[in-house]
Image: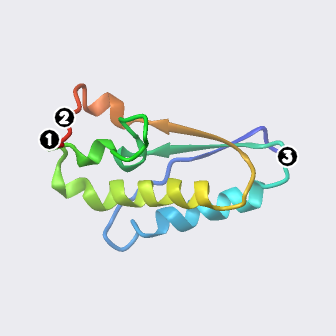
Amino acid sequence: MYHVVADAVGGCTPETIPNFTDIMIHLASVLEDTNTRLIFVGGAGSLFINKERTITVDMGPDFPESWNSLSNAHGAGLKALRESEILIGLIFILLVTLLFKKVYVKN
């Protein structure tokens, strides 16, 4: 058995982006009831910037519109995991913080 499994799905095309959520749920369900930690490399749609967890980086006015489908898929995956009954050791790494030094959010 592995100590850690990392999910850093690449190859983003309009056809493959919807698979992100399914892959996250599949890996989590496979690793349920094990001691293996699951690490996801998430995106702007999964990085909350307020304590209520209602606003994400991709909602900022400077966020590139061309990245919306990918950030939405990451957000949907995180939401699906939170709402599932799958219990795993989960670590979410958000590289988007390296791309955007300041985050501006519309009120």
State if disc 2 and disc 1 touch (CB < 8 Å).
yes
Categorize mark 1 by other alpha carbons within 10 Å: few (<14), some (14-19), many (20+). Answer: some
Measure how far apart labels 3 and 1 are at the Cα level. 43 Å
Measure how far apart labels 3 and 2 are at the Cα level. 43 Å
Residue 13: x, y in percent? Answer: 32, 66
Looking at this view, is 13 or 47 the one in front?
Answer: 47
- Return the residue at label 1: 62
Residue 82: x, y in percent? Answer: 59, 54
Residue 45: x, y in percent? Answer: 37, 50
Measure how far apart labels 1 and 2 are at the Cα level. 7 Å
Categorize mark 3 by other alpha carbons within 10 Å: few (<14), some (14-19), many (20+). Answer: few
Name the quadrant containing residue 16: bottom left
In this picture, residue 76 sits left or right of residue 7? left
State which tag comes first along the sequence, 3 or 1.
3
Q: Secondary structure at mark 1?
A: loop
Residue shown at 74% from the left, 48% from the top: 88
- Return the residue at label 3: 1
Q: Secondary structure at mark 2?
A: loop
- Return the residue at label 2: 104
Q: Quadrant of the C terminus?
A: top left
Q: Secondary structure at mark 3?
A: loop
Looking at this view, is 21 or 60 the one in front?
Answer: 60
Residue shown at 85% from the left, 46% from the top: 1
